[in-house]
Each structure stands twice: as structure tokens, then as C-alpha cells.
Image (spheres, rainbow, N blue to C red):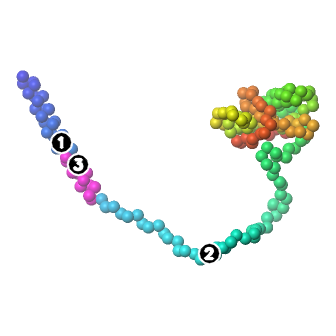
Amino acid sequence: MKQNEGFGRLNHMKTNTLPKIVLMFSLVTIVFAACTTYQEPAPAATIPPQDTEIPLAPTREVATRELPDKFDKLTSIAPIGKEPIDMTPISPADLPVNFQDVAEQAMTELAEKLSIQKDQITLISVQSVVWSDSSLGCPQPDMYYLMVLTDGYRVVLAVEDQPYYYHANQKGYGVICESPNPPYSEGAVDR
């Protein structure tokens, strides 16, 4: 029985001491909080109003300035997908191996689509690119695509001076693109 009495006293001591400790901690916290002071933030610097003349009605006046000498020759920029193309042909044999494969694949698919011989197709350029999603820059209506950057290629081909765009990923999937979108970023161009 004496053993149980010892536990009872210990338990009684815990229940009496714990509220006292909590009360002391609370009082100390309140005292410290009361010792600190709140300071208002300093007001921001004010800018005095300036007298600025504002025209009451819009004018047809156009602001112009002279271009520096280094801009004496301006180049026009075509809309996306309609960029001017250097139609100088290149040979697939002159390309690095990874570009050769995608160029051959593009030429084969275009020849099949147009029902022509591959030798009627001119290779204009092959470029490594990053597409903004899995559509490879050729989104189709009512289709959903993964929104993931996709490494791939853009191949420009020509048949009788008519350009054709072939977009591919690095896993071998490619598509002839009728309304091409620009890539997310462009890499090496092999011309």
C-alpha cells in the first residue's frame, strides 16, 4: 500500500505544480510584452505636385527621333510563320548525323503526302529547337496537348519554291505543319 501512496503524492504534486508553472510563464510573457513599445512606421516621402501641361484633345502629332548611324539599314520583319526564307538548298549528307536522320524523315513524309519523288524536294534548313508543348508548334483544333517543353527539330523544305515546315520531337515523331507556330527557343541551325 505504501507504494500506491507514493504515486498518489507524485501525481498530486504534478497536478498542483503544472498550473503554477503555466501561470508564471503567462505572467512573464505579459510583462515582456508590456515592456516593448509599438512605433508607427515613418511616413513615406511625399513628392510635391508638378505643373505638367496635359493636352485636352489628342493630336495627330507623331514623335520622331533620328536613328544612330548603326541603324542606317533597317530590315523588315515578316509575321510569325511567314518569315523570309533563304531558299538556298543544302544537302542532307553535309549535316551532322542527328540532323541527317530528321531531314531524311521529313523529306520522306513530304514526298508521301504530295505523292512526289524525294529528289523533287529541296532541303532548306534543319534546326534544333524547344517546342512550348507536345503539339510541336502544330496544334490541331479540338486536340489537347501536354504543357511540357519538348526538345525537337524544325525542318524547312521546299517544292518548286513553296516552303513546307516539318516539326519533330527527338523521339522520332514528326508532322508536316501547315500553320506553324514558332518554337519556344531556337538552337543550332545547320544550313
Q: Residue 42 placed where, x, y %?
A: 42, 66
Amino acid type for the residue under numbered disc 2 = Thr
Range of magenta residues: 23-35
Label 2 environment density (alpha carbons within 10 Å; few <14, some 14–19, many ≥20): few
Residue 97 seen in this snapshot: no
Q: Mark 1 or mark 2, which has the lower sequence index?
A: 1
> Which residue lies under the disc numbered 3?
26
- State the CA–CA distance, disc 2 to disc 3: 59 Å
Q: Are marks 3 and 1 in contact (CB under 8 Å)?
A: no
Q: Residue 144 colored magenta?
A: no
Viewer-proximal residue among 59 and 137: 59
The kind of residue tagged 1 is Pro
Mark closest to the chain's N terminus, 2 or 3? 3
Q: Quadrant of residue 8?
A: top left
| Element type at mark 3 | helix
Q: Which residue is mark 2?
A: 52
Say which of 141 and 125 sits in front: 141
Find residue 35 and report its horizontal and vertical position in percent: 27, 59
In the image, residue 116 lies at what x, y percent? 91, 28
Q: Are marks 1 and 2 in contact (CB under 8 Å)?
A: no
